[in-house]
Image (cartoon, rainbow, N blue to C red):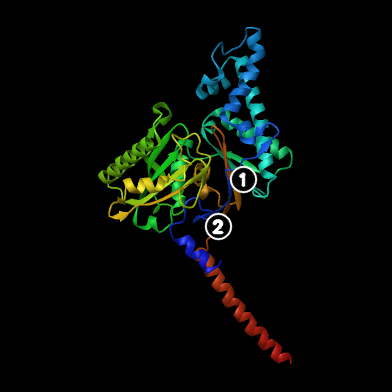
Amino acid sequence: MATDELVKATGIAHHGAERLPSVEIDSFNIEMKDEDGFLGDRASKGAFREILDRWRKPLRKSGEDPFGKEPSENISKKTLDDILVGDDVEASAVVHSAIEDFAQELAYVTRRFLKTKAWAKTERIVVGGGFRDSRLGELAIARTEIILKSEDFKIDMMPIRHHPDEAGLVGALHLAPSWIFEAHDSILAVDIGGTNIRCGLVETNWKKAKDLSKAKVVKSELWRHADDEPTREGAVKRLTKMLKGLITEAENEGFKLAPFIGIACPGVINADGSIEKGAQNLPGNWESSKFNLPASLIEGIPEIGEHDTAILMHNDGVVQGLSEVPFMQDVERWGVLTIGTGLGNARFTNRRKESAKDRDTTENGKKKAKENNKQNNKDSAKSD
């Protein structure tokens, strides 16, 4: 590895960086199309509801729809999960049929990703987003894996480990340089979505697990901004207030809070913290060249503790995927798909760190090689 690359990795990276302390980000937020439009629209939460509605339609005509007149988009995931294990066989069959069709769509979309250059040789895919937080979501993911394996794709698919509401907060830890964790035990994280903004105090538990596998959200606050329809400036003001509240709570409870805020945000994030595209569902125009969220937050929160505030922002799909870093060390290349309003996506390659054991092995190997060379030279001299 070149010296200049090492220097870049040890400092605070730029927003939307391709290289992070633990991974290289090979691609994110790919927007592929087919004859029907954006591929992601075929495997979104809305797509599943449309499929469910299609299966209800013939039963509705005969007056035998087990869901009655309830619109498909209003039926909760919990209700659908209960139906899967309930006594109403016909209702269960409708949900199972919708899961199968959705899995076929997700398999189609995943297949297209795997055939791109950026996703070549992907070994594992984790699936996040709100849809994953349900039994029907888990069944759809498992069925998708079976479909792909039947077509000889050597790929594992699994639900993301952390709750989708927390994965985007925990993942923010992996935006931070590791030296931050030596003197602090927690950070602030923000997960911005088209409907909600969630802020959290994330405890690193770094002393228990240096790979951050035991990190957890200890405090969080949710604001459903879609209900309030605020201006962009109003949203930033509310977000700043939420973060200040968490700083106060962290101080009161004795946390050693790092002067760092990690942000997950929809869209393509530029190095300066502006948003190039993909933020159309956020309140106001977040893609304006005159707007910069990290800069606005630093203006409102210039210091945390006695240190200047540092902020890093990345795509929300990337950050949600980063929560899986500790559990992906047995593979080299892996990806994340987040099923929500659309289909978020990112592909990662692990950066292999040379451990003390590796260094010892390397040094011993070099020493042994030198000894072997000396012996070979002596043997050669004798034979001469």
Q: Residue furthest top?
A: 63
Q: Residue 268's x, y, as percent?
A: 53, 45
- First along the sequence among labels 1 and 2: 1
In the rendered image, residue 139, in percent from the top left (x then y), is placed at 60, 30
Q: Which mark is residue 351?
A: 2
Residue 168's x, y, as percent?
A: 47, 41
> Is 324 placed above or below 365 here?
above
SS class of the residue under badge 1? strand
Give above or below for 26 relative to 287.
Answer: below
Pointer 1 residue: 124
Q: Quadrant of residue 54?
A: top right
Q: CA distance from mark 1 to mark 2?
A: 16 Å
Name above or below for residue 207 compared with residue 161.
below
- x 55%, y 49%: residue: 328
375, 261: nearer the viewer? 261
Q: Residues within 10 Å of mark 2 (few under 14, many from 20)?
A: some
Amino acid type, label 1: Arg
